[in-house]
């Protein structure tokens, strides 16, 4: 079963989808829209195209672990996605994923303009990799 990770943002939403075995991040893209309903519809359209059976949504906690307005916004968007798609959804702590994504792209020689176009997809891929690793470790127990 394929798993989709979503890095939901104000203007750009990163998407990463695992391979069929659920072990590697494969397809990635960015949805460019400020309208949550547009983002939700585009996500819903990607699900059957890629055979997605589970969603992982970035849950932006504060660095001290508390929840702020961004986390509340993500949780509300998650409820919208669950209602729209009927798929199971996990909120995933995404602290530092965007910072790590910027660093990865910078270290690979991408300037700020190029990084802006892909950073959200890379952040979603990092979230997906973390989630897949946790699932593998839990399955090994």
Image: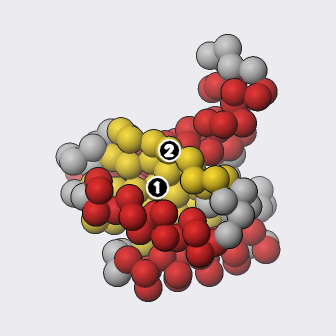
**What is the tally of numbered marks visible in this picture?**
2
User: Residue 5: horizontal and vertical position, in percent?
Assistant: 46, 55
Q: Quadrant of the C terminus?
A: bottom left
Helix, strand or loop at mark 1: strand
The reply to whether residue 130 is in sight is: no
Q: Which residue is mark 1?
A: 5
Q: Earlier in the sequence, mark 2 or mark 1?
A: 1
Q: Is residue 63 left or right of residue 127?
A: right
Helix, strand or loop at mark 2: strand
Q: Residue at x 76, y 28 (%)?
A: 113
Q: Which disc number belongs to residue 29? A: 2
Q: Is residue 132 above or below residue 66?
A: above
Task: Check disc 1: other Cα within 10 Å, few if <14, some if 14-19, many if 20+.
Answer: many
User: Residue 17: horizontal and vertical position, in percent?
Assistant: 38, 49
User: Residue 59: horizontal and vertical position, in percent?
Assistant: 61, 64
User: Residue 127: horizontal and vertical position, in percent?
Assistant: 51, 49
């Amino acid at each position: 079963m394929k798993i989709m990770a979503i890095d939901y943002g104000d203007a750009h939403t990163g998407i990463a989808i695992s391979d069929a075995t659920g072990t590697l991040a494969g397809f990635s893209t960015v949805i460019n829209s400020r309208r949550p309903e547009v983002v939700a519809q585009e996500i819903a359209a990607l699900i059957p195209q890629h055979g997605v059976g589970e969603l992982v949504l970035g849950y932006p906690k504060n660095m001290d672990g508390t929840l702020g307005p961004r986390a509340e916004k993500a949780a509300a968007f998650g409820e919208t996605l669950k209602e729209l798609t009927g798929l199971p959804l996990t909120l995933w702590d995404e602290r530092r994923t965007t910072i790590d994504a910027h660093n990865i792209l910078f270290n690979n020689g991408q300037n700020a303009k190029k990084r802006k176009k892909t950073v959200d997809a890379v952040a979603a891929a990092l979230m997906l990799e973390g989630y897949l690793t946790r699932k593998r470790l839990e399955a090994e127990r």
